[in-house]
Image (tube, grey):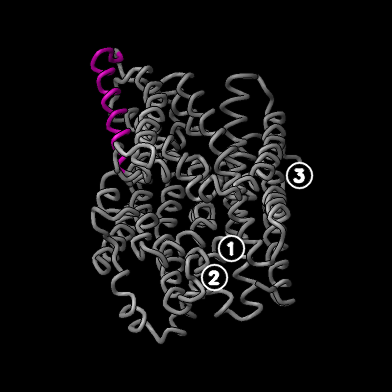
């Protein structure tokens, strides 16, 4: 793929604006001494538009822009949109249920909550597990997928592309913390959705309109796939996807950190619901362009469906605008990267260093440690990322999926148990965090293969459900045998109201109804 001078100018100008705005908006007032709340939680002053768009920018990266469009062009079709649309439903539910409790507790991180509810051991286990997964799995995967995309766009060496993305994401992340990230995401998130919708409308124009598109793709425009579908069966969606969504929308630090930084409960809830509303655009901005690519350029996609979205860009978008979309894709990568870096450094600083090593550390030391760890993590990620080009990893998406399942059952079990089992003892939470990865690992190790013809053929989402049920059973049994004498009293920020504003309930209901309508239309 060749980049014209106009594309290059737009690309460079886009990132100049992003970095300048984020650095300017995150600058400290004269005489203000920056503390950990400023750096890690933007001074707890984020408003709902920033929260919503920042969640979208952090969530959507090349895994969606390339991988989701590719899966749509391949065997799954429109049903791959289920990941984002179920996210729209569950982010509303989380906003109404768990977010008020987390904001009232005044926590910096999700592991911190586990110490209040269970004990320091539970906090340490989740903190270490999260940092390891972020630093050794998620960061290298995001850098690698972004590097591959940049290599395809500009024919840049993979190592150079990875380090370029790492440097850009680190500049504003290390300088301004979460506030800088949120302002950068404002531009990058809007650009991402605008670029995707532009490709959608250009694709419709090339095909001949909506009727020509839907009639040609009638067999792929279904949200519900048969139970024997190997990629995304309805049994997996109903059985295990809700566990993934509870974790991702409500317990995953690099998404939830924006909510914890909300100016008020109303802003936090509306921000999450706004993100859920924006996710409704994903089927049109990302998934359907993948189907259009298969319809328009089937010969170019033979055996390489992941090229669907880039092919639409190169074939339908004019120079200049093409540079804007390239910048939006690269911005999606740097947004996700910066969010992961900030979250990993937050947990490593607040949950590991301050809580386990130096409880009396000054605020200045915590902030500079956070900056230093941001740089350490990006150096490690950039060093590891090119190794994912090795075929033995089976592709970056398989690499991510293979490890994420070890987190979901135990963490969701521990947090839901914290509320649904008020007398669950500390041992219940610790066992959930330990046994979750073990149960999922056993299921992974007994999956049918050439070496294990006797193994099971459960979809990975069903494996997640089975592991969760096992964890929940253990927590219930421990609670029955050794319940707490009285439920634990959690911290409460008196200035943070617990009541949900009526406008929040109305907005959340509208988002869920919109998802229901989409499923009804494309059943």
Q: Secondary structure at mark 1?
A: helix
Give the total number of marks visible in the rendering.
Answer: 3
Q: Which numbered disc, 2 or 3, marks the residue that appears first in the sequence?
A: 3
Name the spot of residue 473 as percent of width and height, x first.
26, 26
Report helix, strand or loop for mark 2.
helix
Disc nearest the viewer among 2 and 3 = 2
Task: Quote the CA–CA distance across marks 2 and 3.
Answer: 38 Å
Q: Nearer the viewer, residue 269 or 129?
A: 129
Visible in this render: residue 415?
no
* Residue 85 visible in rendering: yes
**Disc 3 target residue:** 30
Residue 257 or residue 411, whichever sits in front = 411
- Across and down, in percent, residue 330 comes to 62, 60
Q: Furthest residue to the bottom?
A: 208
Q: Residue at x 64, y 40 (%)?
A: 39
Q: Is residue 293 left or right of residue 468?
A: right
Q: Which residue is mark 2?
A: 195
Q: CA distance from mark 1 to mark 3?
A: 36 Å
In the image, 446 versus 334, the foreground residue is 446
Quote the CA–CA distance across marks 1 and 2: 9 Å
Q: Which residues are magenta?
A: 462-484
Decide whether residue 475 is among the magenta residues: yes
Residue occupying image coordinates x 65% and y 61%: 150
Say if mark 1 contacts mark 2, CB within 8 Å. yes
Vertical placement of 429 versus 372: above or below?
Answer: above
Q: Quadrant of the C terminus?
A: bottom left
The residue mark sitting in front, 1 or 2, is 1
Identify the residue under disc 1. Answer: 329
Relative to 472, 378 lies left or right: right
Tell me what residue is drawn at x 25 percent, y 13 percent.
481
């Amino acid at each position: 793929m060749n980049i014209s001078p106009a594309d290059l100018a737009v690309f460079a100008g886009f990132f100049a604006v992003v970095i300048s705005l984020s650095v300017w908006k995150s600058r400290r007032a004269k005489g203000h001494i920056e503390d950990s709340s400023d750096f890690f939680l933007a001074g707890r002053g984020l408003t709902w538009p920033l929260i919503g768009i920042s969640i979208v920018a952090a969530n959507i990266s090349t895994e969606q822009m390339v991988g989701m469009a590719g899966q749509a062009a391949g065997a799954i079709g429109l049903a791959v949109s289920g990941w984002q649309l179920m996210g729209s439903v569950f982010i509303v539910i989380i906003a109404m249920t768990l977010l008020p409790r987390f904001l009232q507790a005044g926590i910096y991180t999700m592991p911190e909550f586990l110490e209040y509810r269970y004990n320091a051991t539970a906090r340490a286990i989740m903190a270490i597990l999260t940092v390891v997964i972020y630093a050794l799995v998620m960061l290298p995967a995001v850098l690698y997928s972004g590097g591959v995309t940049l290599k395809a766009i500009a024919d840049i060496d993979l190592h150079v592309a990875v380090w370029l993305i790492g440097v850009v994401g680190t500049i504003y992340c290390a300088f301004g913390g979460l506030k800088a990230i949120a302002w950068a995401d404002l531009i990058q998130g809007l650009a991402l959705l605008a670029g995707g919708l532009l490709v959608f409308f250009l694709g419709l124009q090339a095909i001949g309109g909506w009727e020509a598109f839907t009639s040609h793709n009638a067999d792929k425009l279904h949200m519900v796939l048969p139970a024997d579908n190997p990629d995304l069966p309805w049994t997996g969606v109903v059985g295990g996807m809700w566990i993934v969504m509870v974790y991702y929308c409500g317990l995953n630090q690099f998404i939830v950190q924006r909510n914890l930084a909300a100016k008020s409960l109303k802003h936090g809830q509306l921000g999450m619901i706004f993100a859920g509303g924006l996710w409704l655009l994903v089927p049109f901005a990302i998934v359907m362009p993948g189907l259009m690519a298969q319809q328009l350029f089937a010969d170019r996609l033979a055996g390489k469906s992941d090229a669907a979205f880039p092919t639409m860009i190169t074939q339908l978008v004019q120079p200049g605008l093409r540079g804007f979309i390239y910048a939006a894709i690269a911005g999606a990568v740097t947004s996700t990267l910066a969010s992961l870096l900030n979250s990993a450094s937050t947990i490593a600083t607040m949950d590991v260093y301050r809580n386990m090593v130096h409880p009396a550390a000054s605020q200045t030391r915590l902030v500079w440690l956070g900056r230093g760890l941001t740089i350490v993590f990006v150096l490690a990620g950039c060093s590891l990322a090119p190794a994912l080009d090795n075929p033995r990893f089976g592709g970056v998406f398989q690499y991510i999926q293979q490890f994420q399942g070890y987190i979901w059952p135990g963490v969701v079990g521990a947090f839901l148990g914290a509320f649904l089992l008020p007398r669950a003892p500390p041992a219940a939470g610790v066992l959930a965090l330990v046994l979750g990865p073990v149960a999922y690992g056993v299921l992974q190790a007994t999956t049918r293969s050439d070496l294990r013809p006797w193994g099971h053929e459960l979809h990975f989402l069903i494996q997640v459900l089975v592991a969760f049920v096992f964890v929940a059973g253990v927590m219930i049994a421990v609670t029955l045998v050794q319940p707490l004498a009285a439920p634990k009293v959690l911290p409460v920020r008196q200035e943070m109201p617990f009541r949900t504003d009526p406008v929040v309930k109305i907005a959340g209901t509208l988002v869920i109804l919109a998802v229901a309508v989409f499923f009804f239309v494309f059943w």
